[in-house]
Image (cartoon, rainbow, N blue to C red):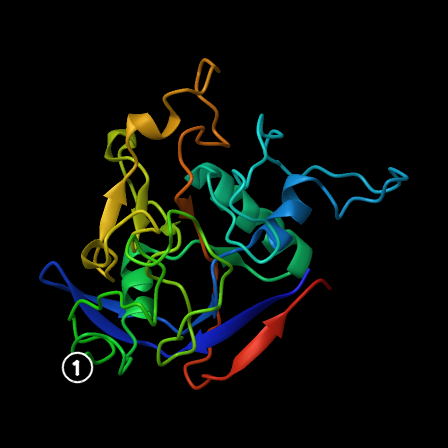
Amino acid sequence: MAFEVVTIPPGTIDIDGNTHAIDPLAVSVTEVTWDLYDVYLFALDVPESGGESDAVSRPSKPYVPPDRGYGHAGYPAMGMTRHAAVEFCAWLSEKTGDKYRLPTRAEWIYLSEASNPLDRHDDRSGSGETVVATAASAWTEENADYTTHPVGKKTPNAWGIRDTLGNVAEWVAPKPGQRPKDGPLAMGGSFLDPSARCTSRDETLQEPFWNASDPQIPKSVWWLADCDFVGFRVVRETGDADSTSGTKEGER
């Protein structure tokens, strides 16, 4: 159960006319893959002998293969609700002893706007300029052939983070005091979107059609039956303003 993280430095970012302070964060280099999500989904971390109690809240088993036939090993996990992503973070925190969570909207924009010479303009980290997907940095409608792709195959940004744009859109944490009608928010666009919509400022509000065919009443809190384009990555607060080196996280 290993995954790679990189620590990004603190800073500020301007969003909608407001300046947001960003603390240093350890960020998963790619979106969470099925390799890791399967451990959580299928309770692969629980001994078959039953000698260890497991009180972790886990998703219901999906009715169809969760990868929708796109590909599994090395591919981004997708189709889960934001609730499922939040509960995954709680499980990961319990397994590692560190506090993992979804990034906030401001954090996600900040981590995706590190300078990259392959972006289509001269962007500077935290400058407030939108970073747009290119064929070198993202899987979009123009080059994805209507499917997700294994993570980590595209050029990283200046902080070593990959796949923020395209491939699958990424859940961000709810705003403090967010009203239910505001709905979950995903960032960055997906393999179904044109590159012009796969940007560091692109956001997509969950819509009813994402789960229209779910037969359950009420609808599942774990899976979006008609959504194959949303996943997530995780962050961990580091409390170390001087640390910028990459690291490996794994089972402890």
**Which residue does the image show at 27% across and 68% down from the upper left?**
134
Q: Which residue is mark 1?
A: 122
**Which residue does the image show at 29% across and 56% down from the upper left?**
188
| Location of residue 116 with respect to 206 vertically, above or below | below
**Which residue does the image show at 37% across and 55% down from the upper left?**
144
- Total numbered labels placed on residues in the image: 1
Q: Does residue 136 appear left or right of residue 220 in this picture?
A: left
Residue 18: give x, y in percent of width and height: 13, 62
Q: Does residue 38 appear left or right of residue 50 in this picture?
A: left
| Location of residue 171 with respect to 28 vertically, above or below | above
| Location of residue 66 with respect to 25 vertically, above or below | above
Residue 28: give x, y in percent of width and height: 49, 65
Residue 161: give x, y in percent of width and height: 42, 72
Q: Residues within 10 Å of mark 1 (few under 14, many from 20)?
A: few
Q: Does residue 15 appear left or right of residue 28 in this picture?
A: left
Q: Mark 1 falls on what kind of element?
A: loop
**Which residue does the image show at 37% across and 79% down from the upper left?**
9
Residue type at tag 1: Asp
